Each structure stands twice: as structure tokens, then as C-alpha cells.
Image (cartoon, coloured by chain):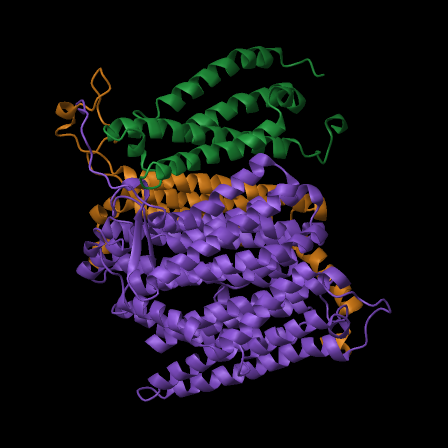
Amino acid sequence: MSELFDLRFLADHAHYFLFIVLMMTGLYIVVDKTNLVKKIVGLNIFQVSVFMFYISIGKVSGGTAPILPMDDKFHVDTEAMAGIAYSNPLPHVLILTAIVVGIATTSLGLALIVRIREAFDTIDEEDITHIEQDMTREDNAKHGNAMGGMA
Amino acid sequence: MAVEPHTVEHTARTLMDHLPVLQVLIPFCTGPIIVFLGSRRLAWPLAFVASALSLIVSLMLLWQVKDGGYIAYTLGGWEPPLGIEYRIDAANAFVLMLISLIGTITLPYALISVADEIKRRDHTLFYACWMLCFTGLLGMVATADAFNVFVFLEISSLSTYVLVAMGADRDRRALTAAYDYLIMGTIGATFFVIGLGMIYMATGTLNMADIADRLADQGANRTVRSGFAFVIVGMGLKIAMFPLHLWLPKAYVFAPSAVTVFLAATATKAAIYVMLRFTFSVYRPEFTYATNTLEMIFLPLAVIAMFSASFVAAFQTNFKRMLAYSSVAQIGYILLGVAILNETGLTAGIVHLFNHGITKALMFMGVGAFVLRAGGSFYAQIAGLGRQMPLTGAALVIGGLSLIGVPGTAGFISKWYLVQAAFERAPDNPMYLAIAVSVVLSSLLAVVYVWRAFEAMYLMAPATDIRAKEAPLLMLVPMWVLAIACIWFGIDTDLIAGAAAQAAAGLFEGSQGMLEMKGAVH
Amino acid sequence: MIQHHLILRVVTKLLVGTIIVFALYVQFHGDFSPGGGFQAGVIMAVAFIIYGIVFGLEKVKQVFPAWIVHKMVALGVLIYAGTGVVSMFLGYDYLDYGAFSPHHPTHGQHWGLLIVEFGVGVTVTGVMVAIYYAFAGRPPAISDEDW
């Protein structure tokens, strides 16, 4: 267990701690906040924590940006390439895709919120729940007497 | 470094070689084409042709792999594990067939239902979204690249949220249903990505077969285990596995009828396939933590789902909501089959995946027809409609019997396999006897909730004096195709059970490995 | 029409052209240096969005009508998928750019990437502008005069 308190260990794994803290912050906001927009913000923080996690695992120590050096005719300069360490570009590419997905999710979520505000006149989850409960009660009063009011 | 002109060895691909990618590509191109043409009249025909074509493609694929083996396809000519690979074997060919079958059958039904429930100006975009959802589901099943699964998962999820929200023309609660689904679905998908990140950290690859090989080499460690946990929880949200099912009833109830039919029959099924792929091919059952997860977590949750969701379903006053809860219970059966962890159990799970798909599609179609005629799906609103719409009513009765698992219907076959699988394990562990009994007992609960619907349809006095007309032909034909399928697959068991057994055997063998890959196209 | 914010309006008019040129630069250098369709598309969309923010939605819709935006969203995806379909018809795998220059696969890949990235750029521009139009086009809860 002593290795847990090893400062060196902590420093080496700092990005994991950051990732977990951010992730939990995001999840907490999603669960706790009743404002729908804040929930989307929480979801964003949650997703960004994953992006950071991916990008941090793509880092090669001493590695530079994975761009191949070119000579003046735009051909890959193999001589200049030798001896350079590159960071792993694959996680970056994956996260580029995930960021696009994140944007789509955010804008779709916000669009839904706009529609919800137009339909319910509020973006607070508790108010919406009350309105929906009333609607369900009305439905039941109107149709729930099926099966002799057993429902 | 200049590249001199030279002859590059290349054998031209034929259309048959392209089948795996065509499966996904045809609907994928159709979505944007519908938007680009922007014609309301062309949207539906295009979508239907695309679905029919992908059904043909999926049948051809299933035909090629039904006796084992697999078809590999590399995208962009990049060799896996670097490039993205599509790999079709018996298991995913089967699920692809289910998805494209349901897609093709539901579209004729959707034409009238959508015209009734959704504003005219949204029809073009509706069918474009439908095609994207279809693409996403097919893609996440066809691909053998773990990250590609996430991308297709999100394509299907995002379009699903839109499709669910389109129910807002009838009931504004569709918006909050879509929003809740969006939050839950995104958390699920993000968990899945975290899991993939951990697997990538441990193995340095994203090709499923390659991951499996490298995991087998390095054995279990903490990264790999937590990756597994994240993948399972993430997919569990998408599947609506018992405690993670909260988004499902609301989304199914308030979505437009046609969307509910499509989602209930395909969306959760594709996610179940992905979970099977990860638990059996990527992580092997030999890993004790994978086995333990199935036995210690899936098994009890599946049994709880079977009982609690059926129990809740029995108390509903809304036909659609009852069916939604019944879906949660039926997903419990599928997971139970998987968690019994023998080949019969897995076969039972896959057979039930198919049988529940067609049964639930049939049931939701019937309810959709009632909604079209009566304006709602509360029992009080559909009272007596079974007598006024005899053909719809009869199809619903067949679906209901199949949902209960009456002999002679498709539902019976899957429950038979389930009980058989439980008995196979019973000699070692008497607990499985109790599980076999619980399958039968929960079917009794199904009798209760299906009976309540039948009672409303046939025995109760109609709510209004106006006699409801029979459902239009375009809705009746898909319904009866599925109803006949329910009976057909309940009598002729070889076809589906044979394909499912092959799929289960393939999954149980685990991955076929990377080395055999070279030139594996047969 | 509101006639204040003189500095903003002048600077915007100066900037819009530059932003578009920069977007095109990022777009067409994407295949051998950092850049590409995603980034270029977003930068291109920024040019229209900033114009819309400063001069109003109606003005930017005169320049870039909503129906063109919708077609662009679909067109870009079709360019991308179509590239793959062409390579399929040439007897290669889907999206195998080697097909465009059978004796010189590297050149073929340059061509393929250029076309595909163009498709991405078109779609991303369209999507970003469409999102802006969709949100800005909604009637506000409180109109500007109520303040």
C-alpha cells in the first residue's frame, strides 16, 4: 500500500487523477442539477474528461507533434525524420471523431431544451416533472378507469 | 522521396466481395440523398428501396457464413489491425438480417402511420433520420473495429433521439423523453469509450480480433478489467439492462408508433450483439472476471428484470407502456440465456433476440394501428377495438401468444431453449433448477399482462359509438407478415435455431484471430 | 436597422474575407500539414456566423440562404461516400484511394484525400451554419424592445 503515498507515483499518474476528478465533476453535475442546460454542461465536462484521458495516453515521453518533416518539394524528408520520437497520433484522431460526436450531442441536447422551453415554459427538471405528473394524472382520470379502476 | 511509376499488384474486387460494406453503405448514402433531393414524394420510396437492398445483401451474407467461417473486408485497402475491418460471421450476419428485415417490413407500415402522426414538412427529414439510424445499427454490428462501433453507435443514437422527439407533434412529453434518453445514452456511450481507451492502453490496438489475441497473451490486469467494466456498463445502458432501463418506457411510449416498432425490434438488439461480441470474442469466457460478471451480476439482474418489469407491466393502463415494460422483461430473458454460459443458453439468447424482435415489432404495429383509429393507446380508448378491427386484433393475439410463449409460436422456442439450457447446468448447480422454474413463472406474469390487453380489446364495451374502420392495407400486410413469421418460426424451428446455434458456436469459439486473416475472403 | 457598433461592423467586414481565405488555406493544406476539412469547415462557418451576429440573421441569410446550407450538409457527405463508391467501381476496396492512380498509389491517395477533405469541409460548414441558423432563428422569449 505504501506505493499509493509515493510522491513519484502520484506525479507519474497525475493525469489519471485529473481525468477522474473532471469525470466525477461532470457526472455529479448531470445527476445533481435540475436545470437542463446545466445538465448538458455537465455532460460536456464528462465527455471532455474522456478526451483528455485519450490524449494523455497518446503522449510518448520526449515525443513531438506527429507531423512528418517535408523537403522543399513536399516529399517526406527521411533524413530529418531519423531520430525523432513522435507522439501517438491515433488517440488524437479518435478524439477528433469523439469531439464531433460531442458537438452533435450538445447541439441536439440544446435544441431539445429550446423545444422543451417552448412546450413547457420552463427548463427546470422539477417543474417539468410536476407538469408531467399532472398530465399523467389527467390521463388516468380520463382513461384509467379501464379494468374497474384497478390501475 | 519521389515514387517512381510502377505496376502495383491488384486483383479487381467484384460486387460479391463488397457485400459487407454495401450492407452499411446503401442506407448511409440514402440518408443524405433524401436530404439533398429534398422531395417529400421521393423520400419514402428511396428509403424503402435502400432497406430492401440491404435486406437482400444481409441474406446473401448470412447465406455465405451460415456454415461457419467469416468474411473480412478492409476499408480503404489498409490491412487490419491498422485499418478498419468489417468482419461478418454467423453471429453478426444473423443480427444484420434481423435489423434489415425489421427495417424493410416497418417502412410500408410507417408510410401511413407517419403521415398521421408527424407534420408534413418534417417527413423528408424523418426518413433521412430513419436511414441514418438504420445505418448506425447495421454499422455497429458489421464492424470489427472497436472504435468504429462507438461511431456507429452514436450515429444511431443521435438519430434515435431525433426520431423519438418527433413524437412531440402528438404529445409534448416526447421532448423530455428524448432528452432523458439523450442524457442516459450519452453517458452510456461515453462509458463505452472510456472502456475502449483502457483496452487500447493495455493492448495498443482497436481491431477486435487483435485485441482478443493480445489480451489472451497478457492475461488479466487492472486496466483490462476496468475496461471490461466500463464497456459492460456503457452497453448495459444502451441495452436497457434491468437497473439501467429507466429511459426506455418513456421513449417507447411517446415516440411515433413507427419509430417505436423499429426501436423496440432493433436498437436494443444491436447493443446486445455488441455486448455479446465483447464478452465472448474480445474478452474470452476463460477470463474468470468475465465469467463472474455474467454469473454474479447478469444472472440475478436478468431474473429480477423478468419478474419486476412483468409485474409493472401488469399494472399499466396504456397498451404501449405495457409493451415497453414487457420489453425490459424480455431483454431479461435474452440476458438470462447469455448468463447461463453454455452453448444452449447462448443459442436461446440469440433465438430470443430474433423472436422477441419480430414479436415486439408485431405488437407495437398493432398498437400503432389502434392509435391511428382511436387516437390513443389507453385500454379505455382501445376498448372493443379488437372486434371492430378483426384482422389487427387477430394479429395482436398471435403476437400476444408469442410474447407469453405458447407452444406453436416463436416465443415458445426461445423459452424452450432457455429452460433446456438451465437444465443442462442443473446437475452441477441446483440453483439452475430454480432459474428454469422462474422462466416458467415469469411467463405466467406475461399471461396476466397480455390478458389485460386482450380483455380491453375484445371484452370491454367500446368507448364510442363510432365504429372504427379496419387498419389500412399497408399496415395490415407488414403486421400479418410478422404474425405468420411468429407462427412459422414456432413450428419450423430449424431455420432460426440452426442459424442461432451456428452464431452461438462461433461466439463461444472466441475470435478467429488475426493470423488467419490474410486472404480469408472466401 | 440598428446602426450602432460602428467599430464592430467595420472590423467584421474586414475580417470576413480574411477568415474565408484562411479557411481555404487550412482546407487545401490539410493533406500534408495540420488542417483539413473539420477545422476548415468550422473556420469557414465562423465567417458567416460572425457576419450574422453583427449584421443580423436576415442579412446573412441573404448571403447564404438556409436551403443552400441544408443541401451542403447532405452534399458533403455524398462527396465523401461517393469517393469511396468510385473507388469501388474501379475495382478497389471502398475508400481505397489507390484506385485513382493505379500506378502511383501515393498520388492517388493525395487526390483521394483532397476530395474527401473537401467533402468534410462542405458538410462541417453546412452543419455549423445550420446549427447557428436553427438556434438564432427561434423567436426569443423576451424581444429586444422589452429591455
Chain with purple colouring: B
Q: Is residue A84 left or right of residue B444?
A: left
Residue found at the far right of this picture: B465
Look at the picture and state if B207 lies above or below B294: above
Q: What quarter of the picture does the C terminus of chain C occupy?
A: top right
Q: Is residue B474 left or right of residue B327?
A: right
**The colour assigned to chain C within the rendered structure:** green
Q: Is residue B81 left or right of residue B178?
A: left
Q: Residue at x 68, y 54 (%)?
A: B112
Q: How many marks?
A: 0
Look at the picture and state if B439 lies above or below A74: below
Q: Is residue B323 visible?
A: yes
Residue A80 is situated, as x and y percent measured from the top left of the image, at 15, 23
Q: Residue at x 69, y 13 (%)?
A: C3
Look at the picture and state if C34 lies above or below B229: above
Q: Residue at x 53, y 63 (%)?
A: B265
Q: Nearer the viewer, residue C125 or B135?
A: B135
Q: Is residue B324 visible?
A: no
Look at the picture and state if C14 lies above or below B217: above
Q: Nearer the viewer, residue B492 or A122?
A: B492
Residue B121 position by quadrant? top right
Residue B234 is situated, as x and y percent measured from the top left of the image, at 42, 57
Q: What quarter of the picture does the N terminus of chain C occupy?
A: top right
Q: Nearer the viewer, residue A1 or A65?
A: A65
Residue A79 is situated, as x and y percent measured from the top left of the image, at 12, 24
Chain with orange colouring: A
Q: Residue at x 38, y 73 (%)?
A: B498
Residue B262 is situated, as x and y percent measured from the top left of the image, at 56, 58
